[in-house]
Amino acid sequence: MTTTLEPTAPVVGKAPARRRVPSTLRHGAALARRGIVKTIHSPEALIDVTLQPVIFLLLFVYVFGGAIAGNSADYLHFALPGVLLQTVVFASAGTGVGLAEDLKTGIFDRFRSLPISRAAPLLGAIGADLVRYLTAGVIMLAFGFVLGYRTSASPLAVLAAFGLVVAFAFALCWVFTALAMVVREPRSVQGLSATIMLPLTFASSVFVPTATMPGWLQGFVAVNPVSRSADAVRALLDGAPAGGAAAISLLTSAVVVVIFAPLAVALYRRRT
Amino acid sequence: MHTTPALEVEDLVRSFGDVRAVDGISFTAEKGQVLGLLGPNGSGKTTTVRMLTTLLPPTGGRASVLGHDVVTDAAEVRGRIGLTGQYAAVDEALTGRDNLFLIGRLLDLPRHEAKARAGELIEQFGLVEAAGRRAKTYSGGMRRRLDLAASLVGRPEVLFLDEPTTGLDPHHRNEVWEAVRTLADDGVTVLLTTQYLEEADQLAHDLVVLDRGLVIASGTAAELKSRAGGRRLHVRPELPGEAAMVAAIVASDVGREPTIAPSGEVVVGTSDPLALRRVEERLAVAGIAVAEIGLRLPSLDDVFLSLTGQATQGVPA
């Protein structure tokens, strides 16, 4: 390697003007941009939000569709809202894994040694992930359309369904952020996240009507927030009244945020 | 008039559970000084740097950077320092240029200034060709240089370098050293931690030697060397098997028992400048062929050995 280190400009000079009150949001946005660029450049992260929804939908519709609903087309109609939720929920687990990786490399030390709010890197990570969830959701819906999914729901109802899904994923990503602060090892975070998410998404009304499940499981499914959210998203996308389920879903998301966001931030601050 | 020192550390303590990683250390660094924190692994160097850079709250004592307390005035400290840690803290998924641009944006530089500053540093650190590539593809030396560049985006007045060359090969190490010298010439105050005596000797004006969380010595490299005792007489016979005979001759002349290294080198401390000539003559009379003979000042390695009773690691070749 032939490189030189000759200075071409004085290193010390007039310090650049810094605004006295740095805005957490502005810094969070700059860091979110980093997260988005990172996703675009990282094949695994990109597959998480692009190919994975497509594969999920194909598998569920054509493997289970006929057996569960008699034919693939009917099952597509039943499953798409749930698989949409499931995809985005799985993507939210990626927040924890990504944070655990960042914390390992020492780049957070650099961020924390800068005159920016300590919450900015966390906000940046989560901001970038909201973009990922939305991408995954849009791809899922578009691919569903290609497979023949049609809805009579108003655009407003579709937007509301998206809002519910993203709100739910946003709430969950605080859980995974807190988890990442405690567990630390990216691989363990990934494994634990899957262990938590699989029963939550499968023991729910996401993939099948719950009538054939044993009673104890129906009890769990009924209180599983993933079920309530899936019901709400399904109702919204069907153009059916979703009031009750939607309210429960939003309330659950709000409760999770109220508990886990401060916890995650406290753990993050303590973690050095 | 009293000027504010760049770094002022007083009885600084940090405990982790029962372990006192830093056990009440004190030192100061004047502006523009390159101060070396020298010590083996686990001596408290990194913990000290983390406290001074506001990443870790002290358990006791106080520390200030340019007059700003690292606990009560942490935001002010962060605005004036740069940190390059032991592990290159760059984002591997971003290009070199984007890494520097991001830091500029986080320091509230307007877009065009952040871009210009990134360009300046890329040129200064010889990363022009690699600037558009993602940091993942960089060699270890390039990553360190990018890391160093990232810590300079905000033109810090005090720069902390925590073992900046650990794990680098000699070529890349020299590149980093050269960069540090350039910074020091420009008046940046540098606190450098290292376990390599050679690095401390090469870069630092003043040294603070840490061992098990305590300052065991401080001063210039020359002062520390003179503290380790006078000159040393070294003799290495052509045939290592004759080392014992050489040692006997040296011992009878100097009056002290020398040490014999595995290489056959015989070493003894002496303050008598004439010992060299006498020993040389007696070896000639005894018919012992000598590969190397001389009087020399103790190296920092000798200093460290005499201070801690424990050898530090040499710089990996």
Image (tube, rainbow, N blue to C red):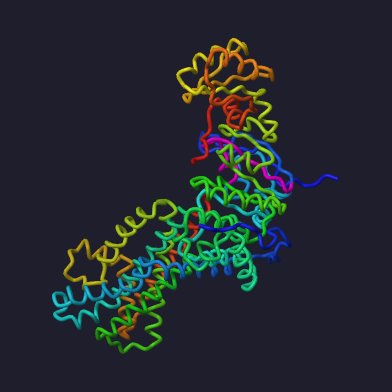
* Residue A10 image position (x, y, % from top left): 70, 60
Identify the residue at image location x=53%, y=25%.
B291
Extreme residue toward the right, this view: B1
- Residue A170: x %, y % from top left: 43, 68
Please tell me which residue is depicted at 63% across the width and 28% down the height of the picture. Answer: B298
Q: In the image, which residues are magenta?
A: B31-50
| Residue at image location 74% in from the left, 48% down from the top | B31
Q: Is residue B172 above or below residue B262?
A: below
- Residue pictured at 16% horizontal, 78% vertical: A69
Q: For the image shown, how many numbered marks are present on the structure?
A: 0
Q: Assign the N terminus of chain B to one quadrant of the image.
A: top right
- Position of residue B96 in the picture relative to residue A93 (left or right): right
B310 versus A61 height, above or below? above
Q: Is residue B175 left or right of residue B76?
A: left
Q: Is residue B214 above or below residue B194?
A: above
Indicate the position of residue A118 as horizontal and vertical percent values: 56, 58
Q: Is residue A8 left or right of residue B313?
A: right
Q: Position of residue A252 (x, y in %)?
A: 39, 67
Front-lying residue, A151 or A145: A145
- Residue A158, by quadrant, is bottom left
Say which of A11 and A158 sits in front. A11
